[in-house]
Image (cartoon, rainbow, N blue to C red):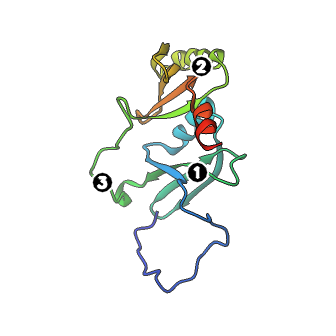
Amino acid sequence: MSDTIEDTADQSATHELGPTSSRWTHIALRVKDIDATIAFYQRYTDLELLDKRQDDDGFGAWLGHSDQKEFPFILVLAQFFPDKDPFAPAPLAKMAPFNHFGIELPTKEAVDDIAARAEAAGCLAMPARTMPDPIGYICMLEDPDGNLVEFSYDQGVYETVRAKWG
């Protein structure tokens, strides 16, 4: 997160392991309260806290699935100190009203459960409903910064990927 930029053209890699080809590895969010955002994603998703750190610019955290060791995909969170935010005075960008993260669940009841918990907590943005194919049965939650997170059932992502890519 540091604003120090160094010429790395002549430096060797810092890390031993890396991808063998181009890979989509993360989505990053600038957040107001990193602890509240971590708690939200841990409460409503199966994401696990991989790393949390602090430096002179603020806090950073990585959340992901521990079973994605071969092809990790990480949600990166950054909370900058007010006097260190390289994007100030721009407001926090948010994924909304249609832009969202999508999480597919194994059952319709799991979507209903998350929707009920979110409604009780005041973060349900769209109640559970059946949408036209290929959307499936979904609900939407709003994270502490207003980003939308869709929880779906029967969306067909797994079936389509396996049918086309094996």
Q: Position of residue 132 (x, y in %)?
A: 45, 17
What residue is at 56 percent from the left and 51 percent from the top? Answer: 61
In the image, which is nearer the foreground, mark 1 or mark 2?
A: 2
17 in relation to 28, above or below = below
Mark 2 burial class by Cα count in 10 Å: few <14, some 14-19, many 20+: many
Give me the disc on residue 41. Answer: none
Tell me how many marks there are: 3
Q: Earlier in the sequence, mark 1 or mark 3?
A: 1
Toward which corner of the image does residue 110 lie, by quadrant? top right
Q: Position of residue 127 (x, y in %)?
A: 48, 14
In the image, which is nearer the foreground, mark 2 or mark 3?
A: 2
Amino acid at the residue labelled 3:
Ala
Does the residue at mark 1 contact the one at mark 2 (Cβ under 8 Å)?
no
Q: Earlier in the sequence, mark 1 or mark 2?
A: 1
Compare residues 145 and 54 and report the one nearer the observer.
145
User: Dot 3 corresponds to which residue?
Assistant: 88
User: Dot 2 corresponds to which residue?
Assistant: 111
Residue 77 visible in the displayed image: no
41 in relation to 113, above or below = below
Compare residues 51 and 134 and report the one nearer the observer.
134
User: Dot 1 corresponds to which residue?
Assistant: 62
Q: Is residue 82 left or right of residue 16?
A: left
Q: Secondary structure at mark 1?
A: strand
Q: Position of residue 119 (x, y in %)?
A: 51, 16
